[in-house]
Amino acid sequence: MLRLTYVLVVFFTTTPAFIASLWVLEKLNLPGRRPLSVRYYRMLCGLLRVRIHTVGTPANGQPTLILSNHVSWLDIPVISSICPIAFVAKREVRSWPIVGIAAELLRTVFVDRTRRHQTAEVNAEIARRLGEGDPVVLFAEGTSSDGNRVLEFRSALVGAVAQVDPTHEVQLQPLSIGYTRNQGLPMGRQHRTVVAWYGDLDFGPHFKEFVQRGAVDVVVTFGTPVPFSNGADRKQMTRSLETTVRRLTVAALRDIPTPVGTAA
């Protein structure tokens, strides 16, 4: 209980200050939002005792849509601690206390997946983020999993890359997240629920158990970026990236070294 209290006190002390800093930078149109967010999320991952092992390199220098599997609420601080990034998140996140405000200031694109007719509007917003230089992470499964497998990727929002200003060279990059150890020991399929948050799991009890169960190791693998051309088949590209993410995730969970390309 003391550990949980400590984590909550630090979170509710530092996060409002982080949000206030983001707001000031936004209102005064000052630089610094990206490095500030990376430092904050590194602090948060340290507070939660999450050890991050990064394989490969996040793409930079041109608009990049990153397609990732999705295991837990923890995915967002983990990825954000590696590089400054924007996310596509479900609409409900916007109404979450504190977290929703931070998500808006970090240029999250919110989507209501129950409203299919909203796809064009969301794609335009994603394309805008990409054109403005923010790499965007899309959890392409459309939901979170139990962490032991990668679900089928949805291709509708991948269409956003076709709406980016044609003067930019757009690319897609596969990203795998695999939670591998708890307290230094291999996690195993039956223990991955320590981290995985999916289905109808209540957040409060899940978060309490996670904090009390100790340190977690996660392998974040950036695959080789794939250039996008307007003549490409969106669904075919999505399936190809899904296959890559599944391969990288299996390698991480089985502790198999996997060479991946890097982006300059």
Image (cartoon, rainbow, N blue to C red):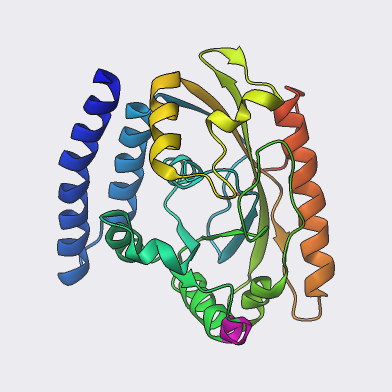
Q: Quadrant of residue 5?
A: top left
Q: Quadrant of residue 29?
A: bottom left
Number of numbered callouts drawn: 0
Decide: is 143 above or below 155: above
Indicate whether residue 170 is drawn in magenta: no
Q: Indicate left or right for 204 with 27 as reference.
A: right
> Is residue 213 at all visible to an observer of this figure?
yes
Q: Position of residue 142 (x, y in %)?
A: 63, 61
Q: Which residue is drawn at 35% across and 27% down?
A: 46
Closer to the camera in the image, 190 or 176: 190
> Is residue 165 at all visible to an observer of this figure?
no
Decide: is 115 above or below 187: below
Q: Indicate left or right for 176 with 130 as reference.
A: right
Q: Residue at x 68, y 57 (%)?
A: 141
Decide: is 256 above or below 204: above
Q: Residue at x 61, y 50 (%)?
A: 144
Closer to the camera in the image, 119 or 205: 205
Q: Where is residue 100 in the image (x, y as percent from the top left)?
A: 32, 60
Query: Looking at the figure, which quarter contains the N terminus?
Result: top left
Closer to the camera in the image, 188 or 174: 188
Helix, strand or loop for the magenta stretch, by majority = helix
Closer to the camera in the image, 149 or 65: 149
Q: Give the range drawn in magenta.
A: 116-120
Q: Position of residue 167 (x, y in %)?
A: 59, 81
Q: Indicate left or right for 225 with 85 as reference.
A: right
Q: Position of residue 135 (x, y in %)?
A: 51, 61
